[in-house]
């Protein structure tokens, strides 16, 4: 194999002084000194979460404060890592939303298991479970990392409702009742 | 049971393909046997035919015959088929030779779509809160045969929700599709006609007759046969969705009928018990009282750990103490009709080895002529077959005098509370007592050694019912931590290997020759009972059983 000798170009005068490189480097430093910072002081400063972000799954209430979940357990069924555990219960005879009949007695989501896939939100027939903006879950024990029903409603808050299907059903039943009498 | 004179097979044509079916059977059943589903709601193989849901509409035809000569008319060398001008319901049709059925024609499909649309007009579609979801025929057939959308624009009818029909049954009238299965069950099977329909048209409503309620001991069968979520079990209501539950075949221990059951459990907790079809024993029915037996698993009096002289110990220590007592001799054994055949065999083997006398007390009571017999133990016949007892009725008087006279110094009691059978606690204190029991009672309180037993749901085994039918059941849920099945205690006492138990049984018990726990067919096997034909048993006439000398 033939050997090819590459000719090394000698440095010019300016290059021998190293000044252009030092000035270019200082420019980068200066630019960054005057530019606004791109990082956040994380625990104190928080990023803006875009709409549709899949954070911690939460339970929500409708604008009238009714708990939307009817404990159909479809989310528990669909959950790939089996993070959700529901104990169904009956709504008390005296409650305002008694006509809904069913509500969860206990609702636990194990955040050590949750993979934030959003299938629970997709499968929910009542639009009761939502993955919202909360993205940071920390705890010192395993128990702390299990969100119980109270915690889930606290995280979830209230979301607008475009159907009010149970209210409509109740109103219609009452209307028909009155018509008969 | 397989009868020798098999009914003749005939040929019918389904969607152009010839099939062999049993002559005279119902078309829905005959098609189900050859793997063709005819959707239906009101038809139930064990009930009378009502034909009111119209879901099983099919096109029927038969070969045309010449009126003068009665000969089959041929067309291109094949019989000419005269199709009925309108679709007919399959459930009210019995198969006949040469019957032609169309299950897949556009007209049949249109019928099903129409019926489904009509049934869904006033249906609340509250599947998320309905207990039937997952095993609902309306849900399944709507998905499979329905249109998938509704043209109905008016408001749906509101009907009574959460109606209490009886102590165990809750009715949601909005979900009812008026198939009348429950009405026919109450009239014909339970002989307690309390259900009926009131109002007309789309206001038609299922209800109890005034002043009556659905409180007979078979009321929960209406929940089982309800094809939708209208009738629901008050006990199971909102407890768990059915798709989470594991099904395990089991046998009801309520009486010697040996009703076949299915245990529905999830993660070691039983949620409900339903009947399992066995046409020779219980058809598709079961008593409500038998369905509550799962509550004994988590009963407050349940024994969950071994104890010696009243203090809790490990099973090993209790077992060793018990072995010492047995070895000390002068042993008597009280067996039980609640033990499995396997356990009874081990007990009788143990009795032989220690030349101990055995007693199997009978528990008789009122029967109902249906599925609760007069013998309230599931396996008294097993005690006879395994040689644990020779007589149909045994009392403990001989045992009590043996204890008094000092002939018996140690006593092994399995699953019996002998204090209710004539042995006082004072008498028991004279002997060293070992008890294997599931629940606390006066006998376990006085016993020196208590070994925790497992319920029928927590162990496997087999029972022999009043027809001398050997039926097996398998473990549905694990027992309390640290406990062993009764058979493993008894096998260690007797020095036998639990795993080869059925080899022993098949070898030493003539009636069980050639059988094994895994080989018993799903609907049981009737064993040779001629050896015990001279004994009189307490059972009277039952749904599928008549005592000897009474014609069925």
Image (cartoon, coloured by chain):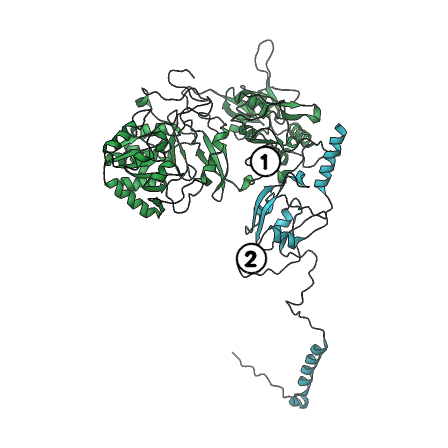
Chain colours: A cyan, B green
The quarter in which the C terminus of chain A is drawn is top right
Classify 10 Å Cα crowding around label 1: few (below 14), some (14-19), many (20 and above): many
Q: Secondary structure at mark 1?
A: loop
* Residue B493, quarter of picture: top left
- Seen at 53% across and 42% down, the residue is B244
Please give the chain letter of the residue carrying mark 1: B
Which label belongs to residue A144?
Answer: 2
Q: Taking B414 as reference, is A29 above or below it?
A: below
Q: Residue B417: horizontal and vertical position, in percent?
A: 37, 34
Q: Residue B323: horizontal and vertical position, in percent?
A: 27, 43
Give the camera-side residue of B258 and B149: B258
- The residue that mark 1 highlights is B132
Please give the chain letter of the residue carrying mark 2: A
Q: Residue B340: horizontal and vertical position, in percent?
A: 36, 34
Q: Is residue A85 visible?
A: yes
Q: Taking B441 as reference, is B69 above or below it?
A: above
Query: Is B199 on the left-hand or right-hand side of B373?
Result: right
* Residue B309, quarter of picture: top left
Identify the residue at the far top of this view.
B68
């Amino acid at each position: 194999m033939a050997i090819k000798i590459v000719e090394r170009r000698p440095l010019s005068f300016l290059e021998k002084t190293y000044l252009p490189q030092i000035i270019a480097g200082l420019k980068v430093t200066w630019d960054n000194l005057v530019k606004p910072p791109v990082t956040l002081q994380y625990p104190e400063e928080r990023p803006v979460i875009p709409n549709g972000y899949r954070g911690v799954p939460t339970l929500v209430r409708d604008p009238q404060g009714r708990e939307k979940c009817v404990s159909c357990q479809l989310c528990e069924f669909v959950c790939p890592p089996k993070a959700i555990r529901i104990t169904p219960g009956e709504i008390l005879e005296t409650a305002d939303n008694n006509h809904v009949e069913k509500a969860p007695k206990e609702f636990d989501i194990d955040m050590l298991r949750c993979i934030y896939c959003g299938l629970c939100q997709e499968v929910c027939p009542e639009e009761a479970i939502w993955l919202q903006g909360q993205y940071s879950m920390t705890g010192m024990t395993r128990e702390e990392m299990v969100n119980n029903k109270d915690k889930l409603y606290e995280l979830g808050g209230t979301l607008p409702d475009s159907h009010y299907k149970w209210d409509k059903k109740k109103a219609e039943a009452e209307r028909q009742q009155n018509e008969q009498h | 049971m397989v009868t020798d004179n098999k009914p003749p097979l005939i040929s019918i044509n389904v969607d152009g393909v010839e099939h062999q079916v049993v002559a005279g059977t119902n078309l829905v059943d005959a098609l189900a046997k050859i793997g063709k589903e005819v959707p239906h709601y009101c038809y139930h193989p064990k009930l009378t035919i009502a034909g009111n849901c119209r879901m099983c509409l099919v096109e029927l035809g038969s070969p045309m015959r010449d009126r003068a000569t009665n000969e089959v008319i041929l067309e291109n060398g094949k019989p000419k088929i005269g199709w009925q001008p309108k679709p007919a319901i399959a459930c009210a049709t019995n198969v006949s030779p040469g019957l032609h059925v169309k299950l897949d024609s556009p007209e049949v499909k249109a019928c099903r779509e129409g019926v489904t649309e009509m049934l869904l007009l006033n249906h609340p579609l509250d599947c998320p809160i309905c207990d039937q979801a997952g095993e609902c025929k309306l849900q399944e057939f709507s998905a499979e045969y329905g249109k998938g959308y509704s043209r109905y624009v008016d408001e749906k009818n509101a009907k009574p929700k959460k109606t209490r029909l009886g102590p165990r049954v809750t009715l949601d009238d909005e979900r009812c599709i008026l198939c009348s299965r429950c009405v026919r069950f109450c009239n014909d099977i339970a002989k307690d006609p309390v259900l009926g329909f009131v109002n007309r048209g789309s206001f038609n409503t299922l209800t109890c007759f005034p002043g009556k309620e659905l409180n007979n001991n078979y009321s929960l069968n209406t929940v089982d046969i309800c094809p939708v979520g209208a009738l629901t079990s008050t006990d199971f209501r909102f407890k768990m969705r059915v798709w989470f539950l594991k099904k395990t075949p089991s046998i009801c221990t309520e009486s010697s009928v040996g009703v076949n059951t299915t245990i529905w459990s999830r993660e070691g907790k039983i949620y409900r018990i339903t009947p399992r079809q066995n046409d020779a024993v219980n058809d598709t029915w079961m008593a409500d009282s038998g369905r509550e037996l799962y509550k004994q698993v988590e009963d407050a009096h349940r024994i969950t750990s071994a104890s010696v002289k009243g203090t809790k110990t490990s099973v090993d220590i209790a077992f060793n103490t018990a072995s010492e007592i047995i070895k000390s001799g002068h042993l008597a054994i009280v067996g039980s009709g609640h033990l499995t055949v396997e356990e009874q065999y081990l007990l009788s083997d143990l009795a032989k080895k220690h030349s101990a006398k055995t007693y199997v007390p009978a528990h008789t009571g009122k029967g109902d002529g249906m599925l609760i017999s007069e013998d309230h133990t599931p396996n008294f016949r097993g005690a006879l077959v395994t040689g644990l007892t020779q007589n149909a009725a045994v009392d403990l008087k001989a045992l009590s005098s043996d204890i008094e006279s000092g002939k018996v110094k140690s006593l092994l009691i399995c699953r019996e509370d002998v204090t209710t059978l004539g042995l006082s606690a004072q008498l028991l204190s004279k002997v060293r007592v070992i008890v294997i029991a599931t629940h606390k009672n006066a006998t376990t309180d006085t016993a020196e050694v208590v070994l925790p037993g497992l319920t029928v749901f927590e162990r496997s085994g087999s029972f022999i019912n009043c027809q001398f039918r050997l039926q097996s059941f398998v473990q549905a849920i694990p027992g309390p931590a640290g406990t062993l099945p009764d058979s493993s205690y008894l096998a260690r006492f007797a020095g036998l290997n639990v795993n080869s138990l059925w080899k022993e049984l098949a070898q030493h018990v003539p009636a069980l020759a050639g059988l094994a726990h895994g080989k018993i067919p799903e609907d049981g096997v009737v064993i040779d009972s001629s050896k015990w034909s001279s004994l009189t048993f307490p059972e009277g006439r039952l749904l599928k059983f008549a005592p000897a000398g009474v014609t069925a």
